[in-house]
Image (cartoon, rainbow, N blue to C red):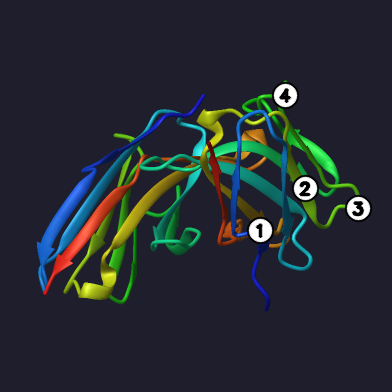
Amino acid sequence: GENVEQHPSTLSVQEGDSAVIKCTYSDSASNYFPWYKQELGKGPQLIIDIRSNVGEKKDQRIAVTLNKTAKHFSLHITETQPEDSAVYFCAARRSNTGNQFYFGTGTSLTVIP
Amino acid sequence: EAGVAQSPRYKIIEKRQSVAFWCNPISGHATLYWYQQILGQGPKLLIQFQNNGVVDDSQLPKDRFSAERLKGVDSTLKIQPAKLEDSAVYLCASSSLAGPTVEQYFGPGTRLTVT
């Protein structure tokens, strides 16, 4: 089955700095890669996603890059703010098995004011 | 648009007791997922429904866990009997098969503590 690895597990940055979270996946059949933000006591919330036919996608301060050859994708948050503090999860979806999602282990991001 | 609803939000039970969780997906979403999220880990898929049929339940511990989605709308996940290692947050999510988007939307989760 698919295996998604995520690094780092914890990340602390100063407010205004950038944060980068990296994920790798194992199954070349995966074609959709969402990123979720999970705040304490809440369910994961989709913040950005990328499909396998796209190399990069940006939405304001958040961007995601995908390298299909190397099977890795990354989340970039620029100009971090305290409200960006949360746990971030990457995921990969295999379209040939009924839209099943596989999640990374999460990165706890702390933005220090 | 209303989000995914789950209840209860919190539940504390003793081991060997039974418990049930309820989920109401976003209206019109054909696919419903139940995930188990143990503290410090990512969500792990337990079961996936498409309408009222099971797409994947390969990681569902069927000796104690069961789930149903009888009318293709809301769903119930049951644990009987519970074990200490079942302590986790149980997340429900839904997605629509319509159009090119396959985003998953999560509910707030039910935090289960087994003592």
Label pair 1/3, CB-CB below 8 angstroms: no
The residue depicted at 86 percent of the width and 45 percent of the height is B52
Residue identified by numbered label 4 = B62
Which residue lies at the image location 61% right of the left edge and 56% below the top edge? Answer: B102
Decide: few, some or many residues near mark 2? Use Cα within 10 Å; few <14, some 14-19, many ≥20: some
Question: Residue at label 3?
Answer: B71
For marks 3 and 4, give the one nearer the viewer.
4
- The chain identifier of the residue carrying mark 2 reads B
Query: Which callout, 2 or 1, points at the residue further toward the start of the chain?
Result: 1
Determine the secondary structure under disc 2. strand
**In the picture, which quadrant includes the N terminus of chain B?**
bottom right
CA gap between label 1 and label 3 equals 21 Å
Residue nearest the observer in this picture, B75 or A79: B75
Q: Earlier in the sequence, mark 1 or mark 3?
A: 1
* Secondary structure of the residue carrying numbered label 3: loop
State the residue position of label 1.
Answer: B8
A56 above or below B35?
A: below
Disc 4 from disc 2: Cα separation: 14 Å
Determine whether the residue tagged by mark 1 lies in a helix, strand or loop. Answer: loop
Q: CA distance from mark 2 to mark 1?
A: 11 Å
Q: x, y (%) of residue A80?
A: 18, 71
**Callouts 2 and 1 in the same chain:** yes
Eye-nearest disc, 1 or 4: 1
- Does A59 appear above or below B106? below
Q: What amino acid type is highlighted by mark number 2? A: Thr
Which of the 4 image quarters holds residue B38?
top left
